[in-house]
Image: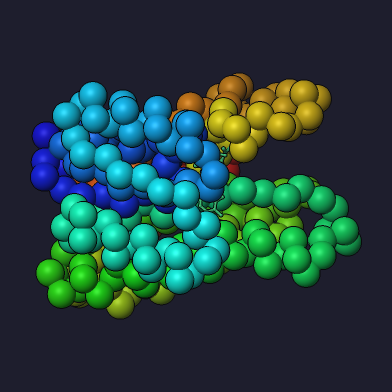
Amino acid sequence: MKLQGQIALITGGSRGIGRATALAFAREGADIAFCHLNDGAKADETAAEIAALGRRALHRSVDVSDIAASKAFAAEVAAAFGPVDILFNNAGMNIRKPFEAYTEADFDAIVGVHLKGMFFMAQALYPAMVARGSGCIINVASQRGLKGAVNSAVYSAAKAGIMGLTRALAWESTPKGVRVNAIAPGPIDTDLTATMDAADRQAFIDALPIGRFGKPEEIAATALLLASPEGAFYVGATLSPNGGDVMY
Ligand code: NAD
């Protein structure tokens, strides 16, 4: 197994991409700690599936935009499971509006979960990774951070920031044994995209070379590549499984 005996901390692990990644990592031998936001029933289901794979699971409702709460969760996980080997920095949400309608509160909420939340969760775990000379951090960005999107100015800006953070941290962390990369998914069928207007969704599909939304498992496969020994040469990279939405 590719992640035998490793400890993974996944933010936003109760459903969607985080859940699929939790199960992919557990299948490869990792114990999984994850947080979510007030999603206890789905979190219990995910934890039961991890346990059925023979791995330990621990979950809490922790708002990743609350830095003190994130740091407390990171410390709790290390005390319960031991040092964290892999951080899958994934928790996210969006507020869709025209540019001129965004308020400062909207801006702070979106940037708080994505850019600030990912920055400080990584910071909470990084010193212990450096002390051990090994670790893997995977930040979930978006194709919207690469090409932008209507009604998602703050989200797109935050996701572009996450790719910048990934590259900056990788310069510092790689000589210390900590690999940092990002994933920029295209449109994936999860609760996040389930609220899209049907006409908008069809227009999106019509514009995609692959002609469909992706599945959470297709992002989990990329996460597993980056976390496993086969991904060792990726440094500060942004991998974008996106059905052809952005080609580069
Ligand atoms: P989802 O809505 O299915 O799951 C989101 C997860 O994040 C849930 O576990 C939720 O409880 C958690 N969460 C939300 N806000 C939180 C907070 N403040 N603190 C802690 N946990 C919080 O969404 P998803 O589609 O699986 O999204 C996962 C990541 O992938 C996000 O970062 C999202 O921006 C990114 N992404 C998704 C798509 C897509 O099309 N679905 C595309 C590109 C990027």
Seen in the picture, residue 21 relative to 9 is either above or below; the reply is above
Which of the pair 29/40 is nearer the observer? 40
Question: Residue 211: horizontal and vertical position, in percent?
Answer: 61, 22
Residue 248 seen by the camera: no
Identify the image quadrant of residue 14.
top left
- The residue closer to the viewer here, 217 or 67, is 67
Q: Nearer the viewer, residue 151 or 112?
A: 112
Q: Residue furthest right?
A: 100
On screen, residue 192 versus residue 171, left or right, reads: right
Q: Residue at x 73, y 23 (%)?
A: 202
Which image quarter holds the N terminus?
Answer: top left
Which residue is located at x 33 percent, y 38 percent? 22
Q: Residue at x 64, y 34 (%)?
A: 193
Q: Is residue 235 left or right of residue 228?
A: right
Against 226, residue 74 (above or below) is below
Give the answer, above or below, for where 78 lies relative to 119.
above
Q: State how the image is colored.
A: rainbow
Q: At which x and y percent is residue 53?
A: 21, 26
For residue 30, say whether it is visible.
yes
Residue 237 in the image: x percent, y percent? 38, 57
Q: Quadrant of ligand 1?
A: top right
Horizontal arrangement in the rendering, residue 224 relative to residue 176 (left or right) = right
Q: How many marks?
A: 0
Q: Residue 232: x, y in percent?
A: 20, 53
In the image shown, does 182 or 23 lie closer to the viewer? 23
